[in-house]
């Protein structure tokens, strides 16, 4: 959101770095899907990043949440994402 990008008054830029984090999580997610034998066709970065942005935005609306970190893990033999909120 515009508020999220500009609310820190230049003290920290989160917009550009978030794209890099999304790319890292995406790459790890694809790698995990392949390792689990899951198909990866149709899992585009744009679609993945859009989903992360929506989930991040929804979680940042919660009181006291300052950031969201995503990790990739295996659940029931399939790649999955876990969102961890950072309070601050």
Image (cartoon, rainbow, N blue to C red):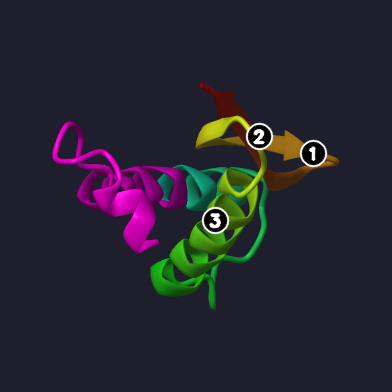
Contact (Cβ within 8 Å) of mark 3 with mark 2: no
Q: Secondary structure at mark 1?
A: strand
Q: Give the foreground label among 3 and 1.
A: 3
**Does label 3 or label 1 sit earlier along the sequence?**
3
How far apart are the two marked residues, 3 and 1, measured between alpha carbons?
24 Å
Which residue is more in the foreground, 81 or 84?
A: 84
Q: Nearer the viewer, mark 3 or mark 2?
A: 3
Q: Are marks 1 and 2 in contact (CB under 8 Å)?
A: yes
- Where is residue 81? Give x, y as percent: 65, 44
The residue at 57%/43% (across/down) is 32
Crowd class of label 2 (few under 14; some 14 to 19; many from 20; radius 10 Å):
some
Task: Tell me if residue 44 can be seen.
Answer: yes
Mark 2: secondary structure: strand
Which secondary structure is most common in the magenta stretch? helix
| Left or right of residue 12: residue 63 | right
Q: Residues within 10 Å of mark 1 (few under 14, many from 20)?
A: few
Which span of residues is magenta-colored? 1-26
Res. 19 in view: no
Task: Say the numbered circle drawn on residue 73.
Answer: 2
Label 1, label 2: how many angstroms apart (C-alpha)? 7 Å
Tag 1 residue: 75
Q: What residue is pinned by disc 3?
A: 57
Q: Is 17 in the magenta?
A: yes
Instruction: Identify which residue, 55 or 60, lies in the foreground.
Output: 60
In this rendering, would 11 be left or right of 34? left
Rounded to the nearest angstrom, the CA distance separating label 3 from label 2 is 22 Å
Say if 59 sits above or below 48 in the image.
Answer: above
* Callout 3 crowding tier (Cα within 10 Å): few <14, some 14–19, many ≥20: some
The secondary structure type at the circle numbered 3 is helix
Q: Position of residue 29 (x, y in %)?
A: 53, 48
Of labels 3 and 2, earlier in sequence is 3
């Amino acid at each position: 959101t515009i508020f999220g990008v500009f609310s820190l008054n230049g003290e920290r830029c989160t917009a550009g770095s978030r794209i890099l984090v999304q790319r890292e999580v995406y790459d790890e997610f694809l790698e995990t899907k392949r390792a689990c034998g899951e198909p990866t066709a149709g899992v585009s970065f744009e679609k993945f990043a859009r989903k992360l942005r929506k989930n991040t935005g929804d979680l940042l609306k919660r009181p006291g949440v300052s950031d969201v970190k995503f990790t990739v893990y295996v659940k029931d033999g399939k790649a999955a994402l876990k969102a961890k909120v950072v309070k601050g």
